[in-house]
Structure formats: structure tokens, C-alpha cells
Image (tube, rainbow, N blue to C red):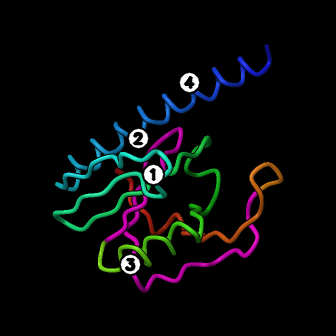
Amino acid sequence: MRGKINNFYLKEKYRMTRTLEKSVISKFNETFGFSVRKTADQYCPIDGLCRENKVLLEIKTQKQNFDDFHTCVIGKDKIDYCRRKYPDWTLYVVWTYDDQSVVYQWNKLDNHFLHPRFGNKKYGFKPHYMVSNNCVKSF
């Protein structure tokens, strides 16, 4: 019985995440004038892309308010993947918080503080970039 409950929870969480991603992509396109589309593969490291404008979009969901911490966090592996697979494309990272959404345009030469061992016991510890709240824009 417990497996069925966990399976239901995971399916519902996936459905809600997909809905949130679609609404963020729609708002992003309205705000910036791109035509980013959700990636078809649910396991793709990037959430959306626009081939015409060479734009990548990564969406990070945070279950807290924006001002609770001084930095926004993204895994180093995501940035490395984008730089390696799409070297000439522009990466936008959107963090959705309980009280607002913020966006950051990641440039090739950006070198934010790299925390070598960030995470928790459940998901493991790995390198993450810390982007100061002063660098992101609300949208």
C-alpha cells in the first residue's frame, strides 16, 4: 500500500511541476519576447529552449520567500552542460519563490561564488553556484 501512495505522490508532484513550468515559460515569453518551448524530454537538464534566438531556460523552484536567503543557487553541472552543449546560446535561469519569481541572464564569463559541497543528505552534496540576490531581476 505504501508504494502506491508514494507512486501517487510522485505522479502528482510531476504534474504540478509541469504545470508550473508551463506558466513560467509563458510569462517569460511575454516579458522578454521570446518563443521558448518546453523541452519534450522530461529528463533533459534544460527546461526550455528557443532555437530562433538561441535561448536556453532553466527553472528552479524554491519553497521559501525570496528574502529568506542572500543568494540564488544552481548546480554547477547545469551550467557546465549548457556551456558544453550550447556554447553560443544565452542561458536564462528563473527561480520561482513563494512570493515572487526572479530571472538572471547567465553570461559565458560569469564566475559566481562556487560552493564546492552544497546540498543535503537526501540529494547529496555537489558543487553549486551562488548568485547574489542583487544580481537577479524580479519579473
In magenta, the rendered stretch is 90-119
Mark 2 = which residue? 21
The residue carrying pointer 2 sits among few (fewer than 14), some (14 to 19) or many (20 or more) residues within 10 Å by Cα, namely many
Between discs 3 and 4, the one toward the N terminus: 4
* Distance CA(mark 1)–CA(mark 3): 16 Å
* Distance CA(mark 2)–CA(mark 4): 14 Å
> Are dots 2 and 1 in contact, CB under 8 Å?
yes
> Are dots 2 and 3 in contact, CB under 8 Å?
no
* Distance CA(mark 4)–CA(mark 1): 19 Å
Mostly what secondary structure, the magenta segment? Answer: strand
What amino acid is labelled 1 in the image? Ile
What amino acid is labelled 3 in the image? Asn
Mark 2 vs mark 3: in front: 2
Which disc number belongs to residue 59?
A: 1
Tell me the element at label 4: helix
Q: Nearer the viewer, residue 73 or 135?
A: 73
- Residue 11, given in percent of the width and then of the height, sits at 57, 26
Q: In the image, what residue occupies the spot 46% across and 82% down?
A: 110
Between discs 2 and 4, the one toward the N terminus: 4
**Position of residue 47 in the picture relative to residue 75 (left or right):** left
Mark 4 = which residue? 12
- Residue 9, given in percent of the width and then of the height, sits at 65, 24
> Are dots 4 and 1 in contact, CB under 8 Å?
no
Between discs 1 and 3, the one toward the N terminus: 1
